[in-house]
Image (spheres, rainbow, N blue to C red):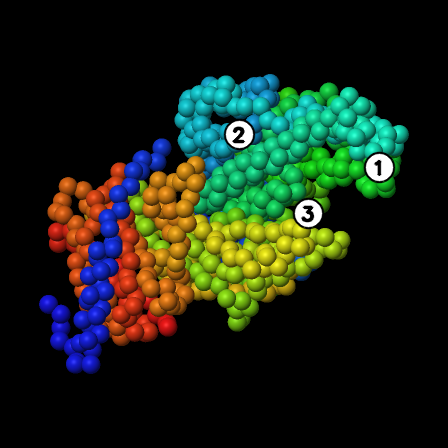
Amino acid sequence: MMNPRVSERRAVRASVTTALVVCSILAAPVHTQQQQPAPQRAEGVLRDNVTAVLVDVVVRDRRGQPVRDLAQSDFEVIESGVAQPIGSFLPVFEQPTGDAAKSAHPAASAAASAIVNPGPGVTALVFDRLRPEARRIAAQAARSYMGSKEESADFVAVFGIDLGLTAYVPFTRNAVALRRALDAMVISSSNGPNTAEARRAVADAMQQAETAARASNQATATATGPGAAAAIGTAPATALLAAMQASIVSDFQAMDQDQQGYATTTALLAIVRSLGRIPGRKSLVLFSEGLSIPDAVQRFYLGVIDAANRANVSIYTMDAVGLRAQSDTAQVRDAVNMAAAGGINSGYSADGVMSDAYTRNLEGNSTSLRSDPAYTLGELASATGGLFFNNTNNLAPAFDRVENDLRNYYLLGYTPTNTTYDGKFRTIEVKVKRPGVTISARKGYFAVRDPGGVAVNSWEVPALAALEQKPVGNAFPIRAGAMLFPERGRPGLVPIVVDLKTAPLTFQAAADGKTYTSDFTVLVRFVDQVDPRGSVVRKVSQHYEIKGPIDQMERAKNGEVLFYRESELPPGLYTMESIVYDALSGKSSVRFSSVEIPKQAEGTLRASSLVLVKRSERVPEKEQRADHPLMVKDAILHPNLGDPISKASKELGFYFVVYPAPDTAATESRLELLQNGKLVAQLPMPLSAPDTLGRVQQVGRLPLAQLAPDTYELRVIITQGTTQVVRSAMVRLTE
């Protein structure tokens, strides 16, 4: 029974009740045919609210042995040219035994009481798409290092990278299981595109294209008229066909290298992020024949380096080809020289326009350099405090070095004197006041708030820096929201949506006057409100670099961007920070909101957020996802994130999902509409039957004709037995 209302509200109440009755009729059950879908952080805190940078440092003498007797006063840390006061100092060394203990330096023996025994280390063995012979060499080296013992000294895992990441065995000290995993890796890994032969094939294809283009130019100069150039069997046509064939090979290789580069960097980021949850120094041993890092993948590659440095993960890279008959550096040199020679001979066509083949050669030079193992693998190791091993079939010393570094290092901590999170890269240089020693340590970090072990991509850095500005930016309108969908097996599923118009963003014409460009980033992160350090629990982002013909720029300005991601959060209370950063203008807009993830048992009644629907969009069958939280049948529902709703739209769609407890009482629901906190109307709302995933997807429509412009609360109350769940959403209604 409804509570009495003052007389002036009775007429409104009656009309709204009628509207809700219509709404319940229109809210037809949705029947769907759906299938079951096939640590301690590297940066800690020295003082409250002050983030410290931890640097693990390996120091060796002229014989390559660990130096054990250094004190805090022997070290100097320089950040971007400025000396930093060392706030914490921890020697981590295994105790020498036998002859090593007898010959230990007296100072080292005296300092032994202050040394922390590291215990078992943690190492990830990663095999990046190797040829059969390279796989055999790499696996044999790993097996030889483990020997025939049944237990490994360290926790080790074996991963393989192809187009995805395969975990052959999780972190374990079971040496038998590790050897079996290595055997499985040898017979299952696939060949990669970045071998010397593959790179030579690309160079050959480029040369064929250049030769064909030169022949076509020469033939065109002697033939007149479009018919002569297009006639089958003529020299120009034959040359054109040859150029097309070579171009297909070259273009495919370029696209394939992009995909391989994405797969490798994404897999490495996943492994590094996982290792970041473990305290202390960790090792990642990467067996590769050379990383393919095209321009499109470069920013992800830099993200791997930054993530490894933040997580105290040193990457040791091993050229799995072994002793090479000819160095790849020479092969890359030849490829670059060949491209240059082609440009000198026929870089321009008869009409003075640079040929496409020569342009492709120029664009390929930087990619060729980053495909050289001595370049990419060496840089990856050096930048993370590891080492690069190549030109040898004997990788045993490399494994010895990995284990030795893992057990013998100094851990230095300092609070940067520059406390501004400006997003800039800050170099780190560690010096030791002792001659004749070698030092290995991380090379720097991006000055952003500690992301909790989450990798920071290069395009995210200015956006993260903009989050720290006071006051935060509000240059253009954006809307952001997070919804709760406690799916089966994913109780913390949080769909994230950021909606913005492109009109306020910067679009600028290129120097040639023929094209335009726009560059912006959407980033969302969740900060733990309970943790006094404000640790970042999750972060998602997208870099948008839009280019097109200049005559389409105005159309692009009138577009809309709908950023959508799905994340999973553990129970807790979080601040959702959403930012859109316009790189060309340096302006940004930031939004903050609170998100609470309740503890929800799998076998109990659960419900999603109540979602107001802005519009729906049909999705092609091949793109449909049965478990998509916002997909109903063949349509995606676009949520309204707070936009006012005009009465002219006549009705408001809404959507929610119920997850009933199995084998209990029937599930019921009712709708309520409140105005200024007072109940206006309520009525039962029949629910549809659960689908094959155990969900009840409910769509309804609220007629607006009888409602006066105001702010309302639409509420759904779901009950099953003695359990009740309430979800609500605010509705701003205008004329």
- The secondary element bearing badge 3 is classed as loop
Report the residue marked by disc 1: 349
Report the residue marked by disc 2: 162
Residue 203 image point, x, y percent: 74, 28
Residue 375, visible in the rendered structure: no
Residue 363, visible in the rendered structure: yes
Residue 69 image point, x, y percent: 59, 45
Q: For the C terminus, give its image quadrant.
A: bottom left
Q: Indicate which label's residue lies in the foreground, 3 or 1.
A: 1
Q: Tags 1 and 2 in contact by the CB under 8 Å rule?
A: no
**Residue 643 shows which numbered tag?**
none
Report the residue marked by disc 3: 434
Q: For the N terminus, give its image quadrant.
A: bottom left
Between the residue at mark 2 and the residue at mark 3, the CA separation in whole angstroms equals 45 Å
Q: Tags 3 and 1 in contact by the CB under 8 Å rule?
A: no
Q: Which of 39/707 is in front?
A: 707
Residue at 79 percent across and 30 percent down: it is: 227
Residue at 60 percent across and 29 percent down: it is: 288
- The secondary element bearing badge 1 is classed as loop
- The residue type indicated by label 1 comes to Ser
